[in-house]
Amino acid sequence: MTGDPDRPMAPANGDDSPTDAQEFARLRSLLVGREQAELERLRREIRDRTLTAENVGRHLPEAIALRAESDDQLARALMPTLEDAFTESVQRNPQQIAQAIYPTLGPAIRKAIAEAIGGIVEGINRALEEGLSVRGLKWRIEAWRSGVPYAQVVMKHALVYRVEQAYLIHAETGLLLSHVTAPDLAAPDADVIAGMLTAIRDFARDSFAAGTDGGLHAFRVGDLSVIVEAGPRALLAAVVRGHHPPALAERLQETLELVHLQFAGPLARFSGDAAPFESARAILAECLETVVDTSGKTHRGLVPRLAWVAVFVALAFVGYILIASQIKWRRALATLRAEPGLVVLDAHRGLRTWHLQGLRDPLARPASVVLAGLGFDTSRVHETWAPYISADPGVVLRRALRVVTAPKGVELSIAGDTLIATGAAPVDWIDALHARVAAIPGIGAVSDTRLTVILPLAVQPVADSVAASHVFFETGSSRLSDAAQAMLRGLGGSLRTIEASLGPAWRAELDVVGRTDTTGSEQLNRALSDDRARVATDFLLHAGIQTTRPAPRGIGTTNPLPAQTLEERARVNRSVSFAVRVRRAEPGGERKQ
Amino acid sequence: MIQKKVCMVGVFATGKTSLVRRFVHSKFSDQYLSTVGVKIDRKPVRVKEQDVNLLLWDLEGRDGAQDIQTSYLRGSSGVLYVVDGTRRETLVQIAEIHELVSKSIGDVPSAIALNKADLTSAWIINDGDRAELGKRPWHVFETSALTGAGVERAFVWLAEQMGSVAS
């Protein structure tokens, strides 16, 4: 024999006789009997274990069903495992779960959305209806006439709603499960009504919305509304008098959910016996209520009013902004147009910006500076200015002032195209003024007639001595004495000295003034003084000495020269006096020194 | 109280509404008013020492089975098929209607009312028809809404059957 691998090796003699075999078996049992038994037990156990799994597999569904019937221990025990399994499954393959629950999820979401939107729309409708409708207006008038607050009028008319009846109806059979009626109302034929409501829902769905999950949700009969909320196993119908808020449907739905939760078993097993639903009456009774919604409605009345006020304020504000902006714009344009050296050719306004285009003298103030001076935000001004030379007096003056700086005591001004200098100025400045100003665009002439010439210091004493010179006459006479003639000739030298110091453009001339004493009539004295002046002038001209024109000039006894005594005063005033006048040789008029 | 929904089906003018009227209100009117949609009535009966509220769904009679609105049948515990003994086609249609009812709500206790028993002289239902009816799982009653004969019996029998089916 080759030997059974399970058995120990036979003794070496190799004899296979039965006696030997028995002997060997005995020996074996003696040697390894205990191990053999142990081995057999283990084998059986392995075999039994397979058996047990099969048995369990066979009986598991029944076992679960049995246990589930007796209590909910099994569900509780399995719950964590199931939750874990579900989570795991969703994590691994969310698509599968999504596909599995899609058929229930879709309609549920649609229904939730539809109801939410329905609620919103109804709320908006109600607010519009009561806020702006003719009825709302009527109530307002009533409130105004009666002096009762609007909120109370609204409450009196429409704010009270009342849930008068509630029906809990078995969805499949249309049989009545439970029913409550407001205490003061007669009990209706509730079971027939429940049946008819179901039939009406079926009819409506079959007729208008066949194949969809939706159903008749609400309908109105006169003052009454019937709201029907549908659940998987039961319907909840409420009969409401008056205007109910959208929230009522939500509350009914919640009540229905509660019923489904509390009566899950009885609903599933229902076969016509409504007794288990007796306790549902308490839940339904909570739906029966007379609600006076004070807060909501006054609010609703207030909202449109506030909205109108807000709209009015907004319009007024916008109007104010527009008008103020227009006024500002016009003021700005007027200022710019009046500004010397600025010519506005095009101006328009954007939404926030201003666009200006035109001509600007480089010496004119920039438009932005002008606008900033008026208090405008110049960052919003877009301006384009082309340069030009302005003949505007203001700009011309500015231009002149850039060329000639007026010394202290001199003021420059513009009249037409003439630059007028006023005050007292030295000779060389007057020369410079004439020389430079001629080149300034916009200036046609320079007038220095109002300008007093300040002589150079060196020749001022000469001029003073001329002013102190007098030609004296006998009473009533205008004849020049020899001394007087000599003095007159001497004046020519003084003039030449002055002219030499002034330069070639200047002429020095003598201003001759004749006077008389107070003897005789004024008329005679005036004629006599004229004579004296003319005599002196003629002599000077004859001697080649310039006098001012028109000459001569007698002033009689007006403006007499002062003296200590009457006699002395008469003597000094029977005279001719002189003053040096310097002028530029070109036309410009004479000026006094 | 136990409630049971019973549907009355059959083609038009077989007397469904009249049977309900007789059963519920003990009245008869020879005016024919066609039912539109469905009309529901209630009749409490006492069956096996128990009060049962029968809710009778009187379905609009149409031309044939295809016109029956099956949604009205849902949740029905029993069906009363109504046949006009004087119009054979109402009997012929019943088989088809029965198929439809079975298909939509399964097999529920059913009875057939051969109505207008007061006009038996005008009946055109023969023994062959009766034998054919006997093959179906329903009990046949001869009823007359006019005289009230057989009406109570038919409804009460149906109520008993439904009671025995219900748990």
Image (cartoon, coloured by chain):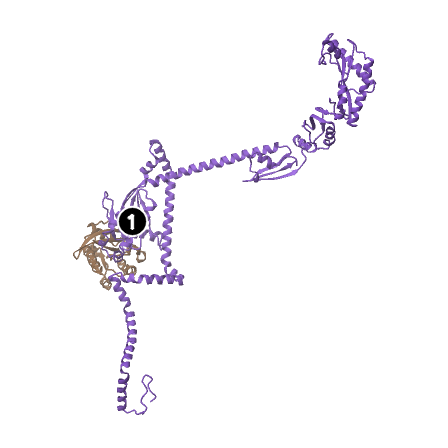
Chain colours: A purple, B brown
Q: Position of residue A473 (x, y in %)?
A: 78, 11
Q: Which residue is mark 1?
A: A237
User: Which amino acid type corresponds to the residue marked 1 in the rendered image?
Assistant: Ala
Whether residue A369 sits left or right of residue B151 in the image: it is right
Examine the image and state in which quarter residue A498 appears: top right
Within 10 angstroms of label 1, few (less than 14), some, or many (20 or more) residues? many
Quarter in which the C terminus of chain B is drawn: bottom left
Q: Position of residue A543 (x, y in %)?
A: 83, 19
Residue A437 sits above or below residue A78 on the image:
above
Q: Position of residue A67 (x, y in %)?
A: 25, 64
Whether residue A256 sits left or right of residue A417 in the image: it is left
Q: Is residue B45 visible?
A: yes
Examine the image and state in which quarter residue A156 appears: top left
Residue A522 sits above or below residue A123 on the image:
above
Q: Is residue A549 visible?
A: no
Examine the image and state in which quarter residue A157 appears: top left
Whether residue A230 sits left or right of residue A304 in the image: it is left
Count the marks: 1
Residue A197 sits above or below residue A159 on the image:
below
Work out which residue is located at the far top of the displayed protein and give it. Answer: A520
Q: Position of residue A470 (x, y in %)?
A: 77, 15
Mark 1 element type: strand
Chain letter for mark 1: A
